[in-house]
Amino acid sequence: MKEISRRSFVAGAAAGVAGAGVLTGPRVAQAQLVYTTSDWKVAEFDKLVRHPATVKQIYNVIHIEDGLFLGALRNSLNGLHFGFGVPTQRIMVAAGLHGPANLLNFDDAIWSKYKIGEWLKVNDPATGAPATRNPFYASKAGPDLKYASGDPDDHGSLYQDTSIQGLQNRGVKFLSCHTATEAQARVLAPRLSPGKHPEEVVGEMLEHLNPDVLVVPSMVAAIALLQSEGHYSYMGLG
């Protein structure tokens, strides 16, 4: 097999996109278990691969585990900047969510309609009951992210915010696995929408992604390219 270089990866992907156009979701008429380069935002992924940061990390996240990995993302940002003096613009942290964690990439509408909390045994900390909303997305600082303090040691500051929204505001890039979404739709469709084609559920899920989430064809493949082509450090969280 011909060795893949960054140049050949970019050229090949761009050619695929130019030849077929970029689609925003799967073809509902048939199962689309495998994305090709014309089916997703490959140019956006290439920008992530080629990001000019000095320190780049890709977190491999499979399990939700009460969102503990979000604290690790915060710790990377704080440790690199405050502890090691790396300028924030020279830091790039990405979170590759697949397996159960992939569901954290979708908004409250999906969590409510498909009873994600009940399915994954994720409770809402506000109620103690199975979550009918994505409890890890919204920041306690409100939709406008107005923090009570700028002190990194203050729990009310940006620097202690472990919500997905807050971490995105600090530059963390969240990735969603298309393969995982397809597999999850095949469980959700018969479970809560008998007779509904799984691809309809996939399309609905993709319409309810959290803002700025990038869907990649396969997370294990995306992580391999981020490591080999982008020189990201691999951070395994199980």
Image (spheres, rainbow, N blue to C red):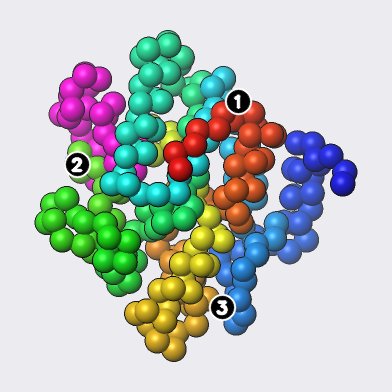
Residue lying at the far front of the rendered structure = 238
Q: Quadrant of residue 165?
A: top left
Mark 1 vs mark 3, CA separation in Å: 37 Å
* Other-residue count near label 1 (Cα within 10 Å), few / some / many at <14 / 14–19 / ≥20: some
Residue for point 53% across, 55% down: 177
Q: Is residue 200 above or below residue 65?
A: below
Q: Secondary structure at mark 3?
A: loop
Residue 187 painted magenta: no
Residue lying at the far right of the rendered structure = 2
Disc on res. 140: 2
Q: Position of residue 29 (x, y in %)?
A: 60, 82
Tally of numbered tags: 3
From the image, tell me which residue sits under label 1. 52
From the image, tell me which residue sits under label 3. 28
Amino acid at the residue labelled 1: Pro
Q: Secondary structure at mark 1?
A: loop
Amino acid at the residue labelled 2: Lys
Q: Secondary structure at mark 2?
A: loop
Mark 2 vs mark 3, CA separation in Å: 37 Å
As drawn, is 56 to the left or to the right of 144? right
Residue 211 seen in this snapshot: no
Start and end of the magenta stretch? 143-167
Residue for point 78% across, 61% down: 19
Please report whichever mark, 2 or 3, sits nearer to the chain's N-terminal start.
3
As drawn, is 127 to the left or to the right of 20? left
Q: Position of residue 182 (x, y in %)?
A: 53, 67
Amino acid at the residue labelled 3: Val
Mark 2 vs mark 1, CA separation in Å: 31 Å
As drawn, is 71 to the left or to the right of 233? left
Residue 96 seen in this snapshot: yes
Please report whichever mark, 1 or 3, sits nearer to the chain's N-terminal start.
3
